[in-house]
Amino acid sequence: MHPELIIAEDYQDLSRKAALRVAEQIKKKPTTVLGLATGKTPLGLYRELIRLHQEEGLDFSRVKTFNLDEYYGISSEDKRSFHYYMWENLFKHLNIPRGNIHLPDGGAQDIEEECRRYEEAIREAGGIDLQVLGIGSNGHIGFNEPGTEWGSLTHLAQLTPETIKDNEEEGGEGIPGFALTMGIKTIMRANRILLLAYGESKANIIARALKGPVDKSVPASILQLHPGLVVIVDKEAAKFLGSLT
Ligand SMILES: O=P(O)(O)OC[C@H]1O[C@](O)(CO)[C@@H](O)[C@@H]1O
């Protein structure tokens, strides 16, 4: 069946199952290039990866990472930045060399150049082996909001009021209105994609993304066309998936 759909008991189970997939990938290919996401959803996965590193010796010394996105107009030291989030929630707990970690630079002066540089860095690393993805309540992936072109590469995106509101609920007031994000095409180029979602609030959008028409109004719906898509959701987020299960 396509995509591979795994329904977890709860958030902890989802996080463990996702971490096992990431760990398997790293064991199979120690030089794995991971695509990483921020937001609430991957926090449990990151905690579990830290545990696997600390207790079971999962080795990140040759792993490379590329994050999906970063807010525009704030520095990487800013506590609202995804640099800060990633450092605090994952990187500082692992044995990954700093030089192997990549995020778009939201403080870059020349945006177009920064976007080109980011695409080039992904290409030079050999492309993304496994991309971890969450889904926004409006179906966005990375910061590719509804209407984004399927052929988009890394670019400056304007966030919708809905996304700003969601992210302020998580990250506090004053979230920038723009971000640098991998494009839909950048994401679709990954060899494998691990899409994660939990909770009732994601049930509707997950069903539209996986069972609805492939349409730009739901950016995540393009994932139906990805041959290496693995979806891990908890029971609540799976509520409307019906016949897919
Ligand atoms: O996991 P959350 O917090 O629901 O966020 C969903 C998605 O929204 C973003 O944070 C961007 O708004 C993505 O990076 C994330 O995957």
Image: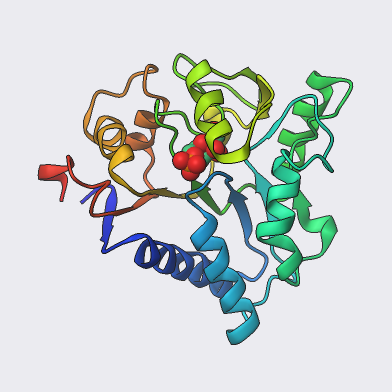
Residue 192: % across, % down: 47, 51
Evaluate whether residue 156 shows in this view: no
The residue positioned 41% from the left and 49% from the top of the image is 196
Residue 49 higher or lower than 3, as above or below: below
Q: Residue furthest front?
A: 173
The relative height of residue 121 versus residue 178 in the rendered view (above or below) is: below
Q: Is residue 178 above or below residue 226?
A: above
Query: Quarter of the image holding residue 82?
Result: top right
**Residue 94 x, y percent position in the rendering:** 71, 70
Q: Residue at x 46, y 14 (%)?
A: 147
Q: Is residue 100 left or right of residue 237?
A: right
Is 233 on the left or on the right of 146, as rendered? left
Left or right: 62, with 3 as reference point:
right
| Farthest residue, direction bottom | 56
Image quadrant assignment for residue 154:
top right
Residue 88 pos. (x, y %):
72, 57
Instruction: Name the foreground residue: 183 vs 177.
Output: 177
Q: Residue furthest left?
A: 243
Task: Please say if 137 is above or below 217.
Answer: below
